[in-house]
Every structure is written in C-alpha cells, then in structure tokens.
Amino acid sequence: MSKMIHRNLRHTPPTAVCAFGMYLRDSKGNTYLDASGGAAVSSLGHGHPDVLAAMGAQMKTTAYAHSGFFTTDVAEELAQRLATDAPGDLNNVYLVSGGSEAVESALKMARQYFVENGEHERRIFIARQQSYHGNTLGALALGGNEARRRQFEPLLMDVARVSPCHEYRYRPAGQEVAEYTAGLLAELEQAILEVGPHSIIGFCAEPVVGATLGAVPPTPGYFKGVRALCDKYGILFIADEVMCGMGRTGTLYAIEQDGVVPDLVALGKGLAAGYQPIGAVLARDHVVERLRGGSGVFQHGHTYNAHPVAAAAALAVQKIIKRDCLLGAATVRGTTLRRMLRDAFGTHPHVGDIRGRGLLVGLELVQDRETKRPFDPDLKLFAAVKEQAMDCGLMVYPMGGTADGRRGDHILLAPPFIATEADLAQIVNRLSDALGRALAAIRP
Ligand code: PLP
C-alpha cells in the first residue's frame, strides 16, 4: 500500500511514467489515449516542447518571487494577455494556483466589493443545484453537489439555490425552449426577491456545465437574462470558467458565445493546460476600481500567487493556442467528435443524449431512452465505464447519477485540441468497447 494519500484510500492508481501528445503510459507499459484531458485540463496534449522550454527558461531566471515583494514580467505579460483577450472590461487579473482558489478569491473579491461600499449586510450567494465550483470550504458551499457536500454541511456558508439550465433533463416535452428559459429566469428572480436583493452578493454559474452534469450548454438567451437580472438588482455575476474556459468550447472564454460580460470570471485547468498548477480571477474595472478607491488592498493572498514558472507555462500555452489556431480546431474537432458519437451511439438503447460545445462533450447514459430513466446509481455504471475504458487504453471522465433520478450517469470527453480525426475515431471505438463491457459487467 502506497504511503501517499490517494482519493481512494484502498486502491493505488497506476503509476504514470511518461506522457506524450495524446497518450500517457504507466509503469506496466500500458498506454492510455487521453480522451478527457485528465479532467478537462490538458488542452495541448502532453510534453509540448514549447511549453517545457518556456518553463525551463523561467526557472533559470526567476523560479520564485513572493508576490508580497515583487511582480515579474512573465506574470504581468500573462495578465495583460488574458485581459486583452477577455470580453468587455474584464481588464484585471489575479493569479492563484488552481480552480478552487480562483473561485474562493472571486467570492472574497465580490464580498469586499460591497463591504467597501458600506454594504456589510450582503452575505448570500446564489448558485445552481447540481453544480460544482471546487473543494475548498467556500467553493464547496457554493456548489450544489450533494455527495461532495454531505459530511461538511455544518461547515458550509448559506447559499440560495436555483435550478440548472439543462434542457435534456428538465424541459418538459412540448415546451418551447424560450418558455423553458423564461421559467428559469423567473425562478432566479423569485430567489433574489425571497432572499432580498440587499442581502445578496452575487450569482455564480458555469457557462457550460462540466463535471456535474456532463457538458451542458445553456439555452439561447439564458445568460443574457441572468446578466439583466443581476443588473436590475445590483448583484454581481460570477462565471466559473475553470473547466469550460481557455478555449475548451471553441472560444477562449465560453461566455463569449452567450454575448454577456460577467463581473468576475474564475479560471483554472486549461489556463496552463496541466503543465503547472495555476488559476486566475478576472475582474471588471468597476470591481477593482472600488477596491482601489476604498481600502486600496484586496484582503486575500496565497504564498504562490502569480508564481513565475506557472505564469510562464500559462503564457506559453496561450501563445500556442493562438499561433496554432487551436480555438478553431476545438470548434471543428468538437463538431466532428459529436458527429462520430452520434454515428456510433445515436440509436444505442442506453445513450440518452450526446451534447456539448467545442471539445467539452458529454454522453448521458440511461436505462430507458424513451423515459430518460437513469440507471440505479447503486450499480455504479460510471465507475464500471471508467474501469473498462482504462482496460481498453482510454481515459474518460465519468460521473454518477443521483438516486432521485435528477441526472443519469454521464461520460465527459475533453480531449486535447491537437486531437486528429484519427484520434477521435480511436476514442469513439474504444469507448464503444468500454461501454459494452461496462453494461455487461453491471448486469446481474
Ligand atoms: N470549478 C469548476 C467548474 C470545476 O470543474 C473545478 C474542478 O473540477 C473547480 C472549480 C475546482 O478546480 P480545482 O480542482 O483546480 O481546485
């Protein structure tokens, strides 16, 4: 038994010994096609020489400089680049070490925004059911993933919750999409009024829901409506782009495709594509100007803020995405992957939905296609799919359904943007094998 604490305390996962392009290899010589980018992280694939060179060069000059004493050119250039490419006046960048830290930092910046204005009574965030925003206590409180929250519930702050925007599961048959969207917005407005607008700090959501629901894009106009409600009631809109951001959906920021500018955006994962741990918060001018004009200090901080080597990795990744036209590739490859999946599973009795945006792609598995009835969660189909996929040399990112049937098991695919058509075909083939074996394994 390994001395390391792994998530599964009874099982040590395979030991990765090398990673190159679309593949990882373990110590037993097995290779795995990375169809999930780890957890929607590795957008450039593994071992990209230009990223390694940029990190190496930065390590030789300044490997670490505490942000309480110094800034660095590389962190400034990264911030400049992220701000320039962001929509609207999201011109201000706070660099942290990962997605949960980014969400925590956004929550605290949002709270301070109101405190600087004397609005101390504002303490409630609104978020959505079945959402995930990270594992630290603030981010966990924001998230609506019951399984992850359960035992920590007494430690979590109050969060008001509304329904997710999830057509496949929740739009009643026969209801127009516009009517469904209007209903969700009415529910959000009702929640704002019930809590009281002056007690609310902000509303937080993933523009395209990743892990908890399996690549669920919003309905047209949903985020325009969210933005309008946040403006109407003077609350902040925080977009969690930790998974869907940094090109994964075909635009650098997923929310660009919805035509609105959030007040704060949290980034992580694809920012440095896994080459270094890094996250970021982007803030609009009005947010930072209030803090600057008030106390002049953001009451927050981490030892590894704006880490120079992490910033060098992220900067290199961002330059490569632009140089190699990888946003376009994510769009085109995403369309191809969904088409291939529809060809392979379009009539499969247990694949209820194939969806996504760009290279954030989801398949929802159901017991019954007609009624959309999920499999019994106790069967742990998602775990069987992961195990069988690993056996077939394929990494996918599956998630379990809920006992109350509000969501089925689903499989998230988020391959690197460098995937070729042949890689995508290989992903679909191996997934087909793995799914067949997993379904056979869970049947009594
Ligand atoms: N927000 C979203 C939408 C995520 O998907 C995740 C991680 O999966 C996080 C936040 C937390 O990021 P991290 O695991 O880097 O702390």
Image (cartoon, grey):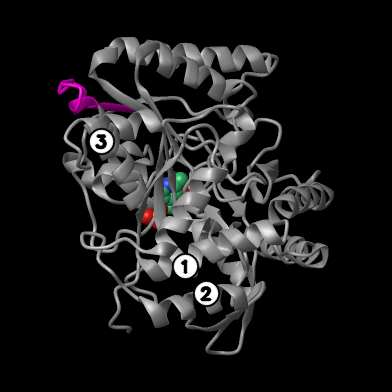
Residue 164 appears in view = yes
User: Where does residue 209 sit, x and y in percent of width and height?
Assistant: 53, 40
Q: Amino acid at mark 1?
A: Ala
Q: Are marks 1 and 2 in contact (CB under 8 Å)?
A: yes
Residue 56 image point, x, y percent:
47, 80
Labels 3 and 2 touching (C-beta < 8 A): no
Q: Pointer 2: what residue?
A: 54
Residue at 67% across, 42% down: 357
| Position of residue 296 in the picture relative to residue 4 (left or right) | left
Q: Give the residue pinned by disc 1.
A: 312
| Secondary-structure class at tag 3 | helix
* Circle 3: residue type: Arg
Q: Residue extending furthest bottom?
A: 28
Q: Secondary structure at mark 1?
A: helix
Give the mark nearer the N terminus: 1 vs 2.
2
Q: Name which of mark 1 and mark 3 comes first in the sequence.
A: 3
Query: From what the image shows, is residue 56 above or below residue 197?
Result: below
State whether residue 421 is above or below residue 373.
below
Is 117 within the magenta? yes
Q: Read off the residue under disc 3.
A: 292
Does the image show residue 376?
no
The structure residue drawn at horizontal position 21% and vertical position 59%, both measured from the top left corner, is 68
Q: Amino acid at mark 2?
A: Ala
Q: Which mark is residue 89?
A: none
Q: Residue at x 21, y 47 (%)?
A: 300
Q: Residue furthest right?
A: 343
Query: How far across and down, in percent of the image, does residue 4 sit?
Result: 30, 78
Q: Which residues are magenta?
A: 114-126
